[in-house]
Amino acid sequence: MLKSLVVFFRNKAIKKGRLKQRSVIMPDVTNLSAITLLMDPDQYKSTKEIEKVLKTLYQAKKFRYVMYCDLIPNDKLQTDTMVFLTKDDFNIFGIIKKDKLDVINSFENEILINMSEDN
């Protein structure tokens, strides 16, 4: 029910925007210094390939990976460029806890790319 309401109002806003004939202005993404990727843990093995493609597209200098998983994997190290989020990192209302939010905000972000399967 909620999803259908969101889709309805989104489509209404799109139609209203078309009537105004606003032109879309894309930001300059040719020279970014930092990119944060939201990924699933099963995409971990392709991070180097993704990084290579993004370097050619955006000329980014730094990459950071935020992965949402059920359990933190034992074979992967959590560093300042690799952050794992679990259900325990969110409160009962679905808002991320302050300590994890501080870790995520400590990295300079210019663009966030959501590559997760689950929206």
Image (spheres, helix red, strand yellow):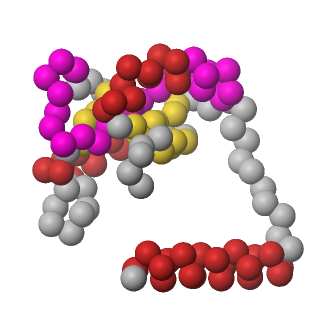
Count how many numbered circles sit on residues in the image: 0
Quadrant occupied by the N terminus? bottom left
**Can you say whether 31 is above or below 114 in the image?**
above
The answer to whether residue 78 is left or right of residue 110 is left
Q: Is residue 65 magenta?
A: yes
Q: Is residue 99 visible?
A: yes
Residue ID at (18%, 51%): 87
Q: Which residues are magenta?
A: 52-77
**Can you say whether 83 is above or below 97 in the image?**
above
Q: Answer with the quarter of the image where residue 25 lies.
A: bottom right
Q: Position of residue 28 (x, y in %)?
A: 73, 41
Please name whichever residue, 109 or 63, is drawn nearer the observer in this view of the structure: 63
Residue ID at (29%, 42%): 68
Quadrant occupied by the C terminus? bottom left
Q: Is residue 106 visible?
A: no
Residue ID at (17%, 27%): 73
Q: Answer with the quarter of the image where residue 3 lies.
A: bottom left
Q: Position of residue 48 (x, y in %)?
A: 47, 16
The answer to whether residue 63 is left or right of residue 118 is right
Residue ID at (64%, 77%): 11
Please name whichever residue, 107 or 118, is drawn nearer the observer in this view of the structure: 118
Q: Position of residue 23 (x, y in %)?
A: 84, 64
The answer to whether residue 10 is left or right of residue 65 is right
Q: Position of residue 75 (x, y in %)?
A: 18, 18
Please name whichever residue, 57 or 98, is drawn nearer the observer in this view of the structure: 57
